[in-house]
Amino acid sequence: MHQGSEHLVCKLHKSLYGLKQSPRTWNQKLDVFLKSIEFMKSEADPSIYIAQVGDVKFFIVVYVDDLILVCNDQTKLLQIK
């Protein structure tokens, strides 16, 4: 996030909420994006994405429309956010 832009919000061109396919569409877009930045989906649980760069490990856990980010390097964690 850039300094001074904390107050900005995104405006959707089309509402996704309330549609039957909304969760699936959101999950597909998230999956494509995370894979494009070198995350791999866990074989044990498809809601967990893992990336490793050297000694730094990243975990992203997806729960409905929330994400939990875990990393063993605070600086890298802030960069990925």
Image (tube, rainbow, N blue to C red):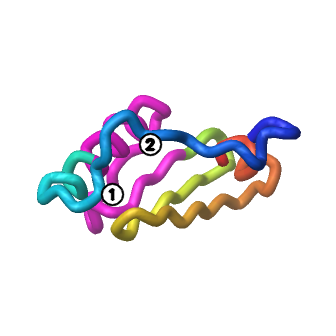
* Residue 37 falls inside the magenta stretch: yes
Q: What kind of residue is marked 1? A: Ser
For the view shown, which residue lies furthest in the top direction? 36
User: The residue tagged with tag 2: helix, strand or loop?
Assistant: loop
Out of 3 and 59, give the one closest to the viewer.
3
Task: Answer with left or right where residue 27 lies relative to residue 58.
Answer: left
Q: Position of residue 46 (x, y in %)?
A: 27, 60
Per the image, the residue denoted by label 1 is 42
Is 54 drawn above or below residue 18 in the view shown?
above
Q: Which residue is mark 2?
A: 39
Residue 34 picture quarter: top left
Image-quadrant location for residue 17: bottom left
State the quadrant of the N terminus.
Answer: top right
Give the structural element (helix, strand or loop) at label 1: loop
Q: Position of residue 32 (x, y in %)?
A: 32, 36
Check the image and name the residue furthest to the right: 3
Where is residue 48 shown, x and y percent of the image? 39, 61
Q: Which mark is residue 60?
A: none
Region of the chain picked out in magenta, as a range: 26-51
Task: Residue at 46% x, 52% y: name it.
Answer: 50
Q: Residue at x 67, y 49 (%)?
A: 56
- Residue beneath the point at 42% across and 40% down: 12
Frontmost residue, 47 versus 28: 28
Amino acid type for the residue under numbered disc 2: Phe
Q: Is residue 24 shown left or right of residue 78?
A: left
Whether pointer 2 and pointer 1 mark residues with C-beta atoms closer than 8 Å, the reply is: no
The residue lying furthest to the left in this view is 20
Q: Residues within 10 Å of mark 1 (few under 14, many from 20)?
A: some
Seen at 60% across and 53% down, the residue is 57
Q: Nearer the viewer, residue 6 or 13?
A: 13
Q: CA distance from mark 2 to mark 1?
A: 9 Å
